[in-house]
Image (tube, rainbow, N blue to C red):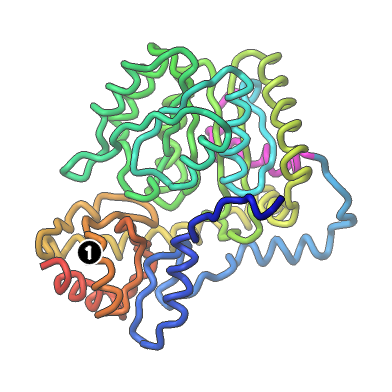
Amino acid sequence: MLETLSPQPADALLALIKLHNADPRPEKIDLGVGVYRTSEGDTPVFRSIKAAEAKLLAEQESKAYLGPEGDMGFVRALIPFVFGKDFDTARVDGMQAPGGTGAVRLAIEVAKRAGAKRVLMGVPSWPNHAQIVTAAGLELKTFRHTTAEGTADLDALKAALGEAMEGDIVLLHGCCHNPTGVDYTPAQWDEIAPLLASTGVFPLIDLAYQGLGEGMEADAYGLRKVLAHVPEALVAYSCDKNFGLYRDRVGAFYAVTGDAGALERALANGATIARASWSMPPDHGAAAVRLILSDEALTADWLAELDEMRDRMRWVRDRLAAAQQVGPIAMAPLGIQNGLFSMLPLSGEQILAIRERHGVYMAGSGRINIAGLTDGNIEAFIAALADVAG
């Protein structure tokens, strides 16, 4: 039987990691792997997480199953940070998922059971978005996310919504767009929210990087604006990035509606899907987040750590933007983008050249993780970019 399986292409990012690890040059630069790095190049465990884990070690009395919904204390502790302290909690409930990926998959599967047939999505997008949509058996309809000037293309979104059909949902990044770093502005969200309400297209918002763009409140602006206008929505949330819990896979899936019965059914269907997919989500990371959010001192320390991360990434962006023009590449737009990622308009040949000649490793799409740049290598990176782009 197994001999009938079709070969699958190797994961490009995993291949890039292997190439970087095998490169003996001490000056090599890794801009491919999508994790936060300090100015020393480390991806540390948060201070607040270590403190919460110590508390968990001392106080946890059992590792018995919690059920497919996971740690509901974690799920509900996140609600005021995601939806706002004044949000009507009768409208929202959720369940834990293994990372933001699991949350997106749950959202897509629940939407499919509710009658969704097609997903509208701006491109480029996180590659796994398309894979999840097609694996769930839904049609994918794409539209352009960015303009030639490097801003979010609101007109393209409007056109896609204007051509939407019954059963369409639209997948939107809440902040820190992956892979472009190009977010809708508050003014654009102010237009998007009532447009979603008037067209009836169902919103699915992926909020994977809250706090890494402009701050916890600012990064939730689009989500909250949309929820103030539409009767219902689905939300996929990740704690992997803003708590540094990458390998612990900590996410949450939320349903928002004004109908108590519909809310109960959405979560019941989510639990059924989860039971057949991963049975129970991993507990440790979510329990640590719950402890942080239930302790004012730990919450304050966590928010301070987010400030440090955000300030460092803003410093990198400002330094890149200060280069203004590197060959044909306009660098200034990088200064107004958000989060870990940006895209450089490089050809495949140029991406290969910068890797071979300068030891700079980036995705074949031109996506770079700006957290891979430090005071010690950023000027070398700009020089390498000028060499291959000029």
Above or below for 250 versus 166: below
Q: Which span is picked out in magenta?
A: 68-88
**Mark 1 falls on what kind of element?**
helix
Residue in the image at 48% along x and 41% along y: 129
Tell me: 301 left or right of 381. Answer: right
Q: Residues within 10 Å of mark 1 (few under 14, many from 20)?
A: many
Horizontal and vertical percent for residue 61? 89, 56
Tell me: 64 left or right of 99. Answer: right
Horizontal and vertical percent for residue 297? 63, 57
Q: Is residue 319 visible?
A: no
Residue 86 included in the magenta stretch of the image: yes
Tell me: 169 left or right of 153. Answer: right
Horizontal and vertical percent for residue 383? 18, 75
Residue in the image at 29% along x and 54% along y: 343
Residue 75 included in the magenta stretch of the image: yes
Residue in the image at 78% along x and 43% along y: 279
Q: Is residue 316 visible?
A: yes
Snapshot quadrant of residue 330: bottom left
